[in-house]
Image (spheres, rainbow, N blue to C red):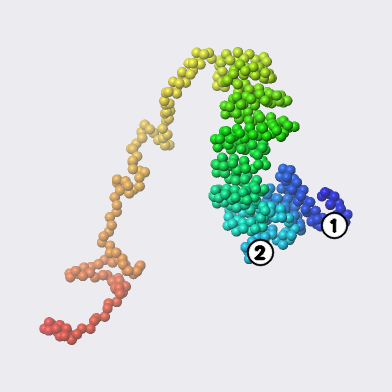
Amino acid sequence: MYRIGQEALIEEEFLEEDIEDELAPITVQLAYVQQMQGRAAEALESYNAFLKKKPQDESSIAVASNNLIALRGARDLFDALKKFDKLFEKRSGGQKMQFTEKLESRLSARQKEAISFNRMLLLLHSNKLDQVRELLPFFLDTFLDSEVPTLLSASLAIKEGKSGRAEDILNQYAIKHPKNSTAAYLACAQVAASSGNYARAADCLEKIVDLQHKLGMVATLVALRERAGNLKAAEAVLDAAVLWWDNHMCDDPAVVEHLTQQAAAFKLKHNKLEEAANLFQRLTKSSSSVVRAEALNGLVCSTAYADPAKAESYEKKLPPLPGLKNIDVEALERAAPVTSSTKRARGVDDSDKKVGDEKSEKARPKKKRKRKPLYPKNFDPANPGPPPDPERWLPKRERSSFRPKKSNKRVVPIRGAQGAAANAPSHTTASGATRSGPAAPVASAAKPAPEPPKPTSSSSQKHKKKGRR
């Protein structure tokens, strides 16, 4: 298709750039086919090569970017969000996120839903829960008939650690929309199984009627019921599946045989020997020699306890194993077991003695090996000299020989501004007053000025004069 279109455009004398733009949708579809076929590396290379060319078709760019991000998964989240931001724009006061005007008219409803859903998943993986809460009402209003907004709401609740609310959201949607309930019930079962409630998960799966007897659904239900401890329910699931496929798939006995084998193995595992023998007996009529051999083996195991004679008769019908014709089984049973640690053949007495020696060796306590002490270089242990100080590793303050320094109490403490006065020797007079040295005027200058003398009354002055007389 791509080659035919390319040849047709070349004949019409289109330029190379115009040809690539015209064939952009086909290029993206070819990459999508590679992706669906499981050729992930080729699809990834095709998408990257297409986006590097920067084509003019915006719808093809949007589809290629979405498929590329879906192929990468949860890797390169920042780059993926940047690519998605180019496809959206804010409208109506910034409250809603919508596609650009060109993409709004060119993308189909299914494509819009897929791109929007993947963008919301990226926001969830990036832990941008506030943006998810803001955009959820827009999705609920835009995609009314889809289960995608409900799945997003449940995913947001799980991200917030509210698994119970997620189950309620999914169950309410499944009840209101029974035709689209499959995805909701599957998601609800996944949530319940992740939280360890296997019985509830199995109940959710049993509500999906269309998938009841699918092989994958049967295997999942049996595993969940077995984990929940309800073996009767698990056995009932297997019996119902065998009966349904036996009635509806007469032309293809391989599925019935496979289910019968699994049911017989399950019953044998849980000691339902009689029922297991009946199923194995049914498998002996198979057209496949491998299935018949496995059925005979199962019959021997299931009848060995109740009827050993019948088990021996089934054992004789087993096909011989290749390469075992010239081996004497009785000689092998009489032979002593050979292990890798055996160096020479030993008799029975030697082996018993060895066992006794091993027990006695285990009972004895292991002696610690003495090692020579390591001395410093040029150290003579015969003449070690005086012993080292036992307090050499202690701090000086903690040693017994430590004596603290005495403080000089005669030093007058310095007061005032830094550098205002120097320490000078003081001289005491006979009256006991202290006179400072040459620095005394500086020190007195640093002191605040004395207050002016208060005025006295005339009577007090007269009294002083009389006293002098």
Q: Is residue 86 visible?
A: no
Who's the residue at 83% across and 57% down the image? 15
Q: Position of residue 454 (x, y in %)?
A: 24, 81
Q: Are marks 2 and 1 in contact (CB under 8 Å)?
A: no
Comparing 410 with 49, the one in front is 49
On screen, 321 above or below 156?
A: above
Q: Position of residue 390 (x, y in %)?
A: 33, 40
Q: Is residue 60 visible?
A: yes
The mark that comes first in sequence, 2 or 1, is 1
Q: Quadrant of the C terminus?
A: bottom left
Q: Which mark is residue 313?
A: none
Say which element carries label 1: loop
Comparing 102 with 81, the one in front is 102
On screen, 349 above or below 107?
A: above
Who's the residue at 28% across and 57% down the image? 407
Who's the residue at 46% across and 19% down the image? 357
Q: Which residue is mark 2?
A: 91
Please indicate whether residue 469 sits to the left or right of residue 96 in the image.
left
Say which element carries label 2: strand
Comparing 44 with 147, the one in front is 147
Mark nearer the viewer, 2 or 1: 2
Please indicate whether residue 466 sits to the left or right of residue 167 in the image.
left
Q: Tell me where residue 463 sits by quadrant.
A: bottom left
Kindly give the residue lying farthest to the right in the view shown: 11
Q: Which residue is mark 1?
A: 14
Who's the residue at 75% across and 58% down the image? 106
Please indicate whether residue 199 sits to the left or right of residue 408 in the image.
right
The kind of residue tagged 1 is: Phe
Comparing 310 with 372, the one in front is 310
Q: Tell me where residue 13 sits by quadrant.
A: bottom right
